Amino acid sequence: MKITIAPSQDKRKIADYLVLPFIEDKKAPKALFAISKFSKIVKGPIETKDFQGKKSQMSVVYGSKERRIILLGLGKADKIDEFHISEIYSEVVAFLKKKKAKTVNIIVPEKLNISKEDLLKGIAEALFLTNYGFDKFKHFSKKESATYLKEATLIGAEKKDMALINKGKIIASGVNLTRDLVNNNADDETPQNLAKIAKTFEKISKDVKVVVFDKKKIAQEKMGFLLAVNKGSDKDPVFIMIHYHGDRSSNDHSVIVGKGITYDTGGLSLKPPTAMDTMKSDMSGGAAVLGAMYTIANLRLKVNVTALVPATENSIGPASYKPGDVYIGMAGKSVEVKNTDAEGRLILADALSYASLKIKPNRIIDLASLTGACVVALGEDVAGLFSNSEKLAKDLEAASRRTGDHLWRLPLYKPYKDHLKSDIADLKNIGNAREAGTITAALFLQEFVEKVDWAHIDIAGPAFLSKPKGLHPTHATGIGVRLLTYFFENLSIK
Ligand code: BES
Ligand code: MG
Ligand code: ZN
């Protein structure tokens, strides 16, 4: 889809639909555009009160230029922020897709209490994110792509606004890259393929350098946990590192880590079939980190960031790592593996050790589809946030509020560390059955974070939806990409 602009109503080309924005007001909905040419046409729905301008309300009337005109409600003026805007326009796109519209004219609302920047970026993101689909495997059944929008024109946007629209496009492309990686077959998105995609990021800018450790180098670095989890797989593990050096005048440096389990069978502690059939999504943290590096580098943000993605399948076979055995990771700590299905925290432990011992950054943020318990606690809309730093938590929560990537903070409640005590090793990899499984997973990770601001985000719920919803037309949402982009954008202007 392309987004084009038209400076005024008269300069527009005729499209399949025209969208007119209104806010809800005491007596009657208020038009947020020059209404004179439309006053006749909108009279009926407004006078009958069929259209009240409530949030996401749409009434279709019939006109002479665009034959179909949508009166769109934005709700009450004081409730409107960038996030609301993208939610509302996402519903418009979903409606247009259903109607098989190919082109749409959208009059950009005026007189709203948010900046034009937020407004246009919100609309552009909604357009690009909702117009996404994943139908490459629909061979005989109807392809959805036949119903995608081809062109949207923002009426009232000027040439100089194109930069904002392009920014929205870059961010949405990052999200859609992540969605593709997660939606694709696990047999295609192997550790090797993730590494190959990371490599292509060097083409974005000379500030990007990609290094991939193979199995031999992983062994040299003593990443015993990553090797252990990999034992049952027919594919080698990789440890992907993407360096982005966007601010040469600063020593500030962040590390982002993403769980890259390209398929999680559970290993010998095998998952039941109904828990396994979504586990191609278990690299969604790694995919989010890749998507975020794509946007950060393309937006040329003034920050220094290294992304780490430890990647392997957690498979089952004669060589699989074994419940009851003890393995030693990069930091030298030993872990009694009581359950091979708690594999994410193991490979993350090696990545966090690598970050704290070798890279020594100012902050570390990890994203992982880590625990089913987090889905029980927070559902599919919200990811769990843990942090040892009030500031980092606050900044991530601020980024979260500006996007649809919702976070809710959970406690690193120290007394539960007891749950991770082992009789024979430094730690065991699971806590007590049914008790605070998300917290004990986070506490396990914390054991591998050395004196650095750190945040852990458990995206097990929102990464892969049980059914498409709102801005997310497919199961994979790309959660984390917008969050990290806004977080680093904010860091770059400090
Ligand atoms: N990848 C799963 C967590 C998961 C569950 C992600 C549901 C997305 C949706 C993780 O590796 C796992 O299996 N965790 C176990 C941990 C347990 C054995 C302590 C779980 O949550 O059951
Ligand atoms: Mg598992
Ligand atoms: Zn897993």
Image (cartoon, grey):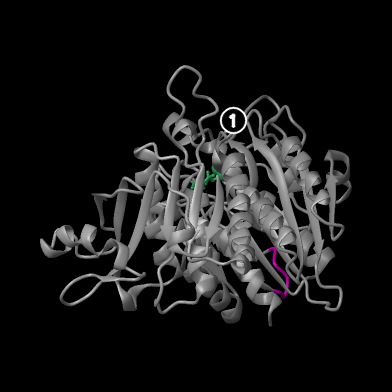
Give the number of callouts. 1
The residue that disc 1 covers is 185
| Above or below for 12 versus 392 | above
Residue 393 screen position, x and y as percent: 56, 75
Q: Quadrant of ligand 2?
A: top right
Residue 467 screen position, x and y as percent: 38, 41
> Could you tell me which residue is drawn at 74 percent across and 55 percent down?
308
Question: Was residue 239 drawn as part of the magenta stretch in this picture?
Answer: no
Q: Where does the N terminus fall, quadrant-wise?
A: top right
Q: Where does the C terminus fall, quadrant-wise?
A: bottom right
Residue nearer the viewer, 349 or 309: 309
| Above or below for 181 versus 105 | above
Decide whether the magenta segment is chiefly helix, strand or loop. loop
Question: Was residue 449 drawn as part of the magenta stretch in this picture?
Answer: yes
Q: Is the shortest distance between ligand 3 and the CB of mark 1 under 8 Å?
A: no
Residue nearer the viewer, 486 or 73: 73
Q: Which residues are drawn in magenta? A: 448-452
Amino acid at the residue labelled 1? Asn
Question: In the figure, is residue 447 to the left or right of 121?
Answer: right
Q: Is residue 333 something one can see in this rendering?
A: no
| Disc 1: CA contacts within 10 A as few (<14), some (14-19) or many (>=20) | some
Question: Please, what secondary structure does the residue beneath circle 1 have?
Answer: loop
| Above or below for 314 versus 169 | above
Tell me which corner region of the image, top left, top right, bottom left or bottom right, holds residue 441: bottom right
> Could you tell me which residue is drawn at 47 percent across and 64 percent down?
8
